[in-house]
Amino acid sequence: MTAAVSAMADTPDLSWLATLPGRCPDCYFHVPTQQHRPNCPAVANVRSMARKSTEANTSDAEWRVFEAAVRADAAAHDGLVSQNRVREAIGARWASVQAKRRYSACWSRARRVGLLEDTDLTERSTDHAGGNAHRIVPVLRMPSWKAAA
């Protein structure tokens, strides 16, 4: 067996690729032309930082408005929360692109902190302004909601 064949059988060390311009230090792909490799740690970190940044830019006042609208919708509909009804209740308060991202982050935050949980129910979105009209969206449940006795 020649040296070239035995060297090919071994896993090559591609770390030198990270030293080339435009290469990702984690996946070694040429980012401008190849994007990142799926499951690249660098992409996961960027997405996590973007989510945290958006949530950090969501003020306490915006969160309180969102939470109040969610609680009111849950109280009026036996604990079920519709994204369409909450958007209509909040109104045009969040109209800019950045504000829409903060509004979207509120839904993610509400699920993560346990304010809302998924159900098997879905509905069609009426968000024409946001470009999500007619998409299927989940109807959520507020687990801490209790019917008045």
Image (cartoon, rainbow, N blue to C red):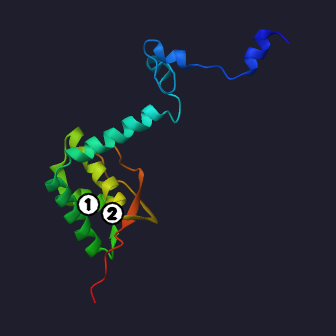
- Dot 2: within a 10 Å radius of its alpha carbon, few (fewer than 14), some, or many (20 or more) residues? many
- Residue 89, image x and y in percent? 20, 61
Q: Tell me the quarter of the picture where residue 86 sits.
A: bottom left
Q: Residue 86 carries which label?
A: 1
Decide: is 41 above or below 111: above
- Residue 97, image x and y in percent? 24, 39
Q: Which residue occupies the foreground of this view, 50 or 75?
A: 50
Decide: is 19 above or below 103: above
- Residue 58, image x and y in percent? 20, 48
Decide: is 149 above or below 109: below
Q: Which residue occupies the foreground of this view, 42 or 64?
A: 42
Provide the secondary structure element on which disc 1 rests.
helix
Provide the secondary structure element on which disc 2 rests.
loop
Instruction: Find disc 2 in the rendering and name its residue.
Output: 82
Q: Which residue occupies the foreground of this view, 45 or 109?
A: 45
The residue positioned farthest toward the right in the image shown: 1
Q: Which mark is residue 123?
A: none
Identify the residue at image location x=31%, y=76%.
Answer: 145
Q: Quadrant of the C terminus?
A: bottom left
The type of residue carrying mark 2 is: Ser
Identify the residue at image location x=41%, y=59%.
Answer: 138
- Dot 1: within a 10 Å radius of its alpha carbon, few (fewer than 14), some, or many (20 or more) residues? some
Count the marks: how many? Answer: 2
The residue positioned farthest toward the bottom in the image shown: 149
Q: In which quarter of the image is the N terminus?
A: top right
Disc 1 and disc 2 in contact, CB within 8 angstroms? yes
The residue positioned farthest toward the left in the image shown: 61
- Residue 81, image x and y in percent? 33, 66
Q: Is residue 54 left or right of residue 125?
A: left
The type of residue carrying mark 1 is: Val
Could you give the CA–CA distance between mark 1 and mark 2, rounded to whole angstroms? 6 Å
